[in-house]
Image (cartoon, rainbow, N blue to C red):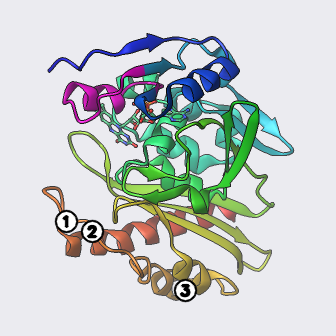
C-alpha cells in the first residue's frame, strides 16, 4: 500500500532535528533506518504528518570509547556494531545479537536507536541493552536526559522517550574484569525476530563464584524485561550445573507470556528457561 501524504525533512544536525520535532509535535515521526516505520506507514498503521529523517546526520553514527565502556550513536547500524572490534571486545553480546538480526539488508540499514525506540517485543537489542546495564541519552531542544535501560522499556512498542525527545546515544558501562556476556535466541525462521531471546552478563571471581549477574529477556512478554529472580539465584554461588539450571528455571518469573501464531505462552515459557540456560553458560564460559 501507499502511505498517506507527509511532509519530509532531512536535517543535518541533532539540534535541527530536535527543533523540528518540537515545532511539529505529536504529528511528527523520526525516521532512522525505516525498517519498522516504513512498513507501518505502508500499512497505514502509522500516519505521521511530518517525517524527520536522521539519515543525513553523520554525527549520530559512531562507536567510541567512553571511560573504558562504549558510547554508540543512535544511527549506528547493526552491521557496524556486529563488526566493531571495540564492541566485540567490550560488549560481545551486543555484537552477537546485532549479527543475529534479520538479514544483511536489514542489518545494513537498521539502527540501534531505531530498534530501541521502536521497542518491538520481539526485537533483539532491548534484552542486550538491559543485560549490559546501558544508559540512553536523549536530545531535545537545548536539553539532554539519561534514562537507564531498566526504565526505558515501558510496554508494548512504548518507551520512556517523550514525544519531543530523540534517542541520541547509548552508553554501555565498562564491565569489571572476569565478566562475560552472551545472547542466545530462538528466532522466527522467516524474519529472525526473537520468539524468545536472552542476554546475560556474568562476572566471576577467581574461584568461579558469580559476583554479579544481569539477565535481559525479549520476545517472551509484551516488553523486554530484567530477570532479577535469575540474577539473585546466580549471585554468590559457584557456577556449576545445579546453580545454572536452578537459576534458569526461574527465567519466566513475573512474565505475562505472549501467545500468537509463532508460539503459545506455554512454549515461550519453556523456551525462556532453555535459552536463559544457554546464555548464562556462554557468558560464564567467556567470563572464565
Ligand atoms: C524483514 C525484517 C526482519 C526483521 N527481523 C528482525 C530481527 O530478527 N530482530 C530484530 O530485532 N529486528 C528485526 N527487524 C526490525 C529491524 O531491526 C528494524 O530496523 C528496527 O526495529 C528499527 O530500526 P530502524 O533504524 O529501521 O528504525 P525506523 O523503522 O526508522 O524507526 C522505528 C521507530 O523508532 C523511532 N525512532 C527511530 N530512531 C529514533 C531515534 N533516534 N530517536 C527517537 N525515535 C526514533 C521511529 O520514529 C519509529 O517509530 C526486522 C525488520 C524487517 C523489515
Count the marks.
Answer: 3
Q: Is residue 273 left or right of residue 144?
A: left
Position of the N terminus by quadrant:
top left
Other residues around mark 1 within 10 Å, as few (<14) / some (14–19) / many (≥20): some
SS of the residue under disc 3: helix
Magenta residues span: 30-50
Which mark lies nearer to you, 3 or 1? 1
- The reply to whether the C-beta atoms of the residues labelled 1 and 2 are less than 8 Å apart is yes
Q: Alpha-carbon neighbours of circle 3 within 10 Å: few (<14), some, or many (≥20)?
A: some
State the CA–CA distance, disc 3 to disc 1. 30 Å
Viewer-nearest residue: 168 or 48: 48
Residue 40 colored in magenta in the image:
yes
In the figure, residue 22 lies in which quadrant?
top right
Q: CA distance from mark 3 to mark 2?
A: 22 Å
The residue depicted at 45 percent of the width and 35 percent of the height is: 26
Question: Mark 3: is the Cβ under 8 angstroms from ligand 1?
Answer: no
In this rendering, does residue 61 appear at all? no
Figure quadrant of the C terminus: bottom right
Residue 257 painted magenta: no
Label 2 belongs to which residue?
A: 268
- In the picture, the disc for residue 35 is none
Residue 99 image offset from top left, x and y in percent: 46, 37
**Disc 2 packing (10 Å; few <14; some 14–19; many ≥20):** many
Mark number, residue 243: 3
Front tag of 3 and 2: 2
Residue 52 lies left or right of residue 38; in this view the side is right
As helix, strand or loop, the secondary structure at mark 1 comes to loop
Determine the residue positioned at 44% across, 29% down: 29
Quick one: label 1 or label 2, which is nearer the N terminus? 1
Residue 259, numbered label: 1
Amino acid at each position: 500500500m501507499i502511505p498517506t501524504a507527509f511532509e519530509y525533512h532531512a536535517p543535518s544536525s541533532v539540534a535541527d532535528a530536535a527543533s523540528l520535532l518540537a515545532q511539529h509535535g505529536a504529528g511528527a515521526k523520526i525516521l532512522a533506518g525505516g525498517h519498522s516505520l516504513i512498513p507501518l506507514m505502508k500499512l497505514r498503521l502509522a500516519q505521521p504528518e511530518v517525517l524527520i529523517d536522521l539519515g543525513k546526520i553523520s554525527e549520530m553514527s559512531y562507536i567510541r570509547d567512553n571511560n573504558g565502556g562504549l558510547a554508540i550513536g543512535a544511527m549506528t547500524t547493526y552491521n557496524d556494531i556486529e563488526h566493531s572490534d571495540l564492541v566485540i571486545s567490550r560488549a560481545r553480546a551486543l555484537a552477537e545479537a546485532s549479527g543475529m538480526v534479520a538479514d544483511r539488508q536489514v542489518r545494513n540499514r537498521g539502527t540501534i536507536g531505531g530498534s530501541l525506540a521502536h521497542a518491538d517485543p520481539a526485537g533483539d537489542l532491548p534484552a542486550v541493552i538491559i543485560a549490559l546495564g546501558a544508559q540512553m541519552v536523549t536530545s531535545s531542544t537545548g536539553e539532554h536526559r539519561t534514562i537507564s535501560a531498566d526504565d526505558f522499556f515501558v510496554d508494548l512498542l512504548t518507551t520512556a522517550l517523550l514525544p519531543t525527545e530523540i534517542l541520541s546515544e547509548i552508553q554501555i558501562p565498562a564491565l569489571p574484569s572476569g565478566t562475560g556476556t552472551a545472547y542466545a535466541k530462538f528466532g522466527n525462521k522467516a524474519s529472525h525476530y526473537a520468539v524468545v531471546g536472552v542476554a546475560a552478563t556474568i562476572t566471576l571471581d577467581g574461584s568461579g563464584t558469580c559476583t554479579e549477574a544481569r539477565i535481559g529477556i525479549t520476545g517472551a512478554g509484551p516488553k523486554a524485561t530484567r530477570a532479577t529472580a535469575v540474577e539473585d539465584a546466580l549471585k554468590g554461588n559457584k557456577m556449576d550445573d545445579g546453580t545454572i539450571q536452578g537459576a534458569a528455571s526461574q527465567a519466566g518469573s513475573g512474565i505475562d507470556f505472549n501467545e500468537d501464531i509463532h508460539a503459545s505462552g506455554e512454549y515461550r515459557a519453556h523456551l525462556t528457561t532453555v535459552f536463559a540456560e544457554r546464555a548464562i553458560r556462554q557468558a560464564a564460559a567467556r567470563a572464565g
